[in-house]
Amino acid sequence: MNPSVQLLNLIILSFLISSCTTSKKDDQPQNLSEAYNDYFKIGVAIGPRTLETDQAELILEQFVSLTAENVMKIGPIHPKRDSFNWGPADQIAEFARSNDMVMRGHTLCWHNQVPDWLFILGEQEVIRDTLLNRLKFHVTEVVSRYKDIVYAWDVVNEAISDKDGEQYRNNKWFEIVGEDYIAKAFQYAHETDPDAMLFYNDYGVVNPVKREKIYLMIKNLLGQGVPIHGIGIQAHWSIEKPTEEELVKTIELFASLGLKIHITELDISIYPSREDQEISQAEFLETAEQKQVEQYQMIFNVFRKYKDHIENVTFWGISDRRSWLDNYPVAGRKNYPLLFDKDLQPKKAYDVVIKF
Ligand code: G3I
């Protein structure tokens, strides 16, 4: 064959191969983060031990943002007044650094998982100034250590009350300091890392009554000039709730304050209520899986529609192998709330989330 015709054939062939590969890749994203590259970061909450198992590979393949499920909370990371337990949190941070991931910091000020020393001095309860000094010390130490890798902090977690007619949860922070512990926590975090995005994080945000309470609190904080940049919607949802209407209302309400929205702790329980009997995996596949698929499809449709406001969507766990929902609200009742099964294989819900 004439050498120039041969060369032309080669050029045409390599063009065909490369366009085929590109279109195949464009049609079928290889993982969640690739699928949502133009939308929001996809994250996962983990413990350091998972990084030493087969789950590490799945984390690397699917996610770009990590949250420590427990080890950055005050009790685990600051067990004694003068000493920190950095090891477990460092392990996650190091994994994120080495793999070009980011982290959401969870959480600087919460009433749960607190160490024994925090509210006590000698035999007495601490006074307001002492507690604020302790909060400042804690926030400054933790935020400065992870400044390079944590881009967003859940500064205050679950400060709003679930009780009718009560605005703030009556926890030790509120009891000793008063409601301004919330503003102070944001100020301390902002002073330590002015570049970090600072979030108020809560559950039940789609509930109209609680949503209104949270909205009022954040509006008030913004009015006082408190550095709060976003709302963390935890999203511990079920196959029945929320409805699309409530979800949309919630997103639009917080977006109207100019806040960024992070979906911080997403999982879809297969049990609509705490009274439901436990079902086996086989029963799940038969009876509840389709509902879960539809719920995941609906919420991701909404998330995509509001991509200009939503910046991160984080799952609260890697796979159905283990979830906090295996022990809540009913101890020992197995749940199947995530996108991967216990063998780390993608479920049907994964397919509808990734293909749109
Ligand atoms: O670390 C101890 C371990 O030493 C001990 O052997 C073991 C025995 O039970 O307990 C371990 O602590 C457990 C810890 O998780 C770590 O696994 C606690 O008992 C257990 O209560 C704790 O649960 C965590 C829960 O927060 C605490 O309230 C869940 O894993 C975690 O998923 C959950 O996460 C919260 C978010 O931070 C805030 N939003 C709600 C969400 C779900 O509750």
Image (cartoon, grey):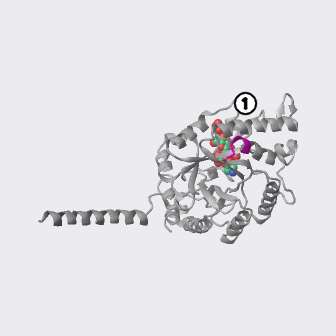
> Is 36 on the left-hand or right-hand side of 243?
left
Q: Residue 236, position in %: x, y?
A: 66, 57
* Residue span colored magenta: 190-194
The answer to which image quadrant residue 91 occupies is top right
Whether 311 is among the magenta residues is no
Q: Nearer the viewer, residue 22 or 56?
A: 22
Q: Which residue is mark 1?
A: 80
Q: Residue 317, position in %: x, y?
A: 58, 51
Q: Residue 341, position in %: x, y?
A: 51, 55
Q: Nearer the viewer, residue 155 or 194?
A: 194
Q: Which image quadrant shows ligand 1?
A: top right
Q: Residue 338, position in %: x, y?
A: 56, 57
Helix, strand or loop under label 1: loop
Q: Nearer the viewer, residue 319 or 307?
A: 307
Res. 76 in view: no
Question: In this rendering, is residue 337 above or below 112?
Answer: below
Res. 22 in view: yes
Whether 192 is among the magenta residues is yes
The yes-or-no answer for disc 1 within 8 Å of ligand 1 is: no
The residue at the point 46 percent across, 47 percent down is: 57
- Residue farthest bottom in this picture: 245
The residue at the point 66 percent across, 63 percent down is: 272
Q: Main secondary structure of the magenta part?
A: helix
Question: In this rendering, is residue 27 above or below 330?
Answer: below
The residue at the point 86 percent across, 43 percent down is: 177
Could you tell me how many numbered marks the image carries? Answer: 1
- Which image quarter is the N terminus in? bottom left
The residue at the point 65 percent across, 45 percent down is: 105
